[in-house]
Every structure is written in C-alpha cells, then in structure tokens.
Amino acid sequence: MTQHVIEIYSSVFSALEDKELISGDFKGKLKLNSKLKAALSLLEAKELTSGSYSYFKDGSAKSSITLNQINIDRFDDSYFFEVDLSGNVSKGDYVICRNWEAVLTNETKVKSPAKYIFFTETETLLTPFSQEVKYSNYLNVQKVYHLVKRLAESTEGGDKTIFFERPLTFEFVLVEADLDYAIDVDALEKLLNKDLHQEAINCLICKELVSFLKDIHVKERFSYLIKHMSSLISNVLLSYQSYVESYTFDKVRKEYLEKRTAYISKIHDVFDAIATKLLTLPAGIWFATSQINQLNVEYINDIAFYKNIAVLVTVALLAILMLLNLIGKFTMLDFQKKEYSDIFAELLKSFKDEAININSAKIDIDNEDAKVRSKLRYSIFATVALCALTFSIFIAAFP
C-alpha cells in the first residue's frame, strides 16, 4: 500500500539525529540508505526538503551534494548528511506543525480538518487509522462548523454570523483542551432535516444559540459551544417539544392547505406546459392535409403522390412526438403523487386529530390529479384521431 507523504516525512524525521529548529526548518544528521534516499526524493518533490545537503566523513565536513548525485554504494556508515525538513506546512489534507495549537488556531483546518497530521514537538503521527481520542474529536469539529454555517446562511450571515434579534459572530478557533469533549450533533441534524416545521426549527436553534452564546467573547464562542454542545442540544430539543405541543390546529390547517394549493398548482402545470403545443396541433394538421392533392390514374409517376406521402409522414412524426410528450407527463404526475402522498402520510402521523381534514385536502389533490390525467388521455385520443383523419384523406386522394 502506498504511503502518504506525511508517513514518509515521519519516518525520516524520526531517523534524524541531533535535530534543531532553525528559521522554521529542522536540521539534523542522517546516515543514508537506499530507503531513506527514496524517502527524501519524494519529500523533495513535495517541497518538504531542499534536496541539497552537506555531508561529513568521520566528523569532518566534505562538501555539498544533491540527492541526484548521491550513490548509496559510495557512502558507508562513516558518512552522514546534514538534512533539512520543513517544520511548518499546511497543504491539502495534511499538516506539519509543532502541536495542536498550531492546527486549532488555523480556521481553514478547523472548517476542513486535515486527515494527516504530524506534530514535531512530540513526533506524533495522526492518520485516519489513528484511534487517538483528540484526533477523532478534531475530525468531528467540522460538523459543528457546518451546523453554524447552515444557520448563518439561512439568516444571510455568510458562514460565520447568525442574525437573530442580534448578530452572533463566530471565529472558528479552538484550544487543545476543547478536543477532550466528544462531539455529537446527530440530534440537531435530524431535527434540521425534518420535512415539517423547517422555518420554525431554524428559528428555535438560532434563538437557543444566541441565548446560549451572546455573553461569550467572539473568540471564545466556538470553543464554548464545543464544550457545552450537549447542553445546547438539550435546550433545543426541549424548546422543540414545547413548540410541537403548542402547535395550534389553525397552523396545522394552514400547513396542509398550503400543501394542497401548492400540489394542485403543480399538477395543473403539468398539462399547462404542453397545452400551447396541443393548440397548434389541429392547425398544423389542417395545413398539412390541405397540401394533399387528388391523384390521377397514373399516380405512380405523379409528383403529387410523393408529396402526399411526405405530408402523411410529417403528420405521423408530429403525432408520435406529441404522444411521447403526453405519455411522459403521466410519469411526472406519478412522481408528484408519490411525493404528496408521503407528505400527507407524515401529516397524518403527526396530527391524528386532524385526520379527516388532512384526508379531505389529499382527496382534493387526487381529484385534480384525475382531471389532469383525463385531459391528457383526451389529448392522446385527439392526436390519434387527427392522425387517422389525415390518413383517411390520404387514402381518399387515390383515384
């Protein structure tokens, strides 16, 4: 299995002797072998080492040499190289830095966590296979960021400001101690993904966040939120439960009536989208049939015969295209019917006391669906009839 560049960096870093940090780079002694040379070549390609090193024999400085010039067979254990490694790098999915503080004060790596991390202070390597608790919690921090971002965007506050009665701005920075706290926002995500009460749920969570964090300094808000996430979730769930219990039947009625109106409009739009084309069909066929000429006895050699065939083929193609379009509308109606049936089934589960009215609203939609389907069937019949009429005129043109 191919090693990640950070895993290779870690192996070279561990082999480096007498390391010291100079101007952001680590320098130390290294006895080369073919494996380490290959590792350094890869690190050079990733710009994590210079690739040009001084080398020594028996402690005496000799010269500088590049990796390409090094022939391992010529350098025994009496030689060592003064190798440099970058000490602070943040690229793509990996980070090389001193400790957690360097990662957590970088907003970019809080919003989008690095999967591979190497800490030079402790020579600690973290990868997706690591079981380290802080690392696991760090990867989950982005869930909280995405929660804040989603709420901020819903209030038109970019990705870091929630507007609810007052602006609540975040700076996405943490301290290492925050990673001692497990992060689980599944309950809030399930709440936000509910089909019903979307606007109310957003408002409830925004309200609880503002109340929870308004007195916390902007630079400490995200940290405080991470530490007290369970308390926030409890408050939100209690508020939502209270909201559901106090949800009046007038609001329920408004909700299912709005659904009824919206879906009736969608259903009629299915037919309206093709109605204009249907209106042009009779005129088009009338014009086409007017071009059919009476044939004489020698019609095989008459150009009028072939014109009549061209008219018939044109009308047939027009009718086929129209029929395919009309039949496709039934599929669209089927999808819409499944969609609103699922929504009304959910409404029935949530508000059993309003079952009669909810079913009545659904029946209204079903009736309109049936009307539109009847229009489509009539349109199919009319199209076939017009096509048949054209064919009969074509036949009548023969002597």
Image: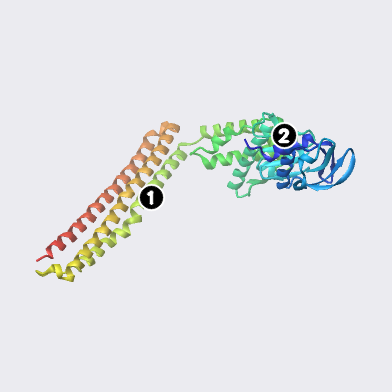
Tell me the element at label 1: helix
Residue 84: where, in percent of width, then height?
A: 80, 43
Mark 2, Cα crowd under 10 Å, few <14 / some 14-19 / many 20+, is some
Q: What residue is at 72 percent from the left and 37 percent from the top?
A: 35
Circle 1 sits on which residue? 265
Is there a contact, CB below 8 Å, between mark 2 and mark 1? no
Mark 1, Cα crowd under 10 Å, few <14 / some 14-19 / many 20+, is few
Q: What residue is at 68 percent from the left and 38 percent from the top?
A: 116
Identified by mark 2, the residue type is Leu
Which quadrant would the N terminus be assigned to in this image?
A: top right
Q: In this view, does 348 lie to the left or right of 201?
A: left
Residues 107 and 126: in front is 126
What separation in Å lies between label 2 and label 1 (alpha carbons)? Answer: 59 Å
Q: In this view, does 308 lie to the left or right of 128?
A: left
Q: What residue is at 80 percent from the left and 35 percent from the top?
A: 121
Circle 2 sits on which residue? 125
Q: Which of marks 2 and 1 is in front?
A: 2
* Residue 172, numbered circle: none
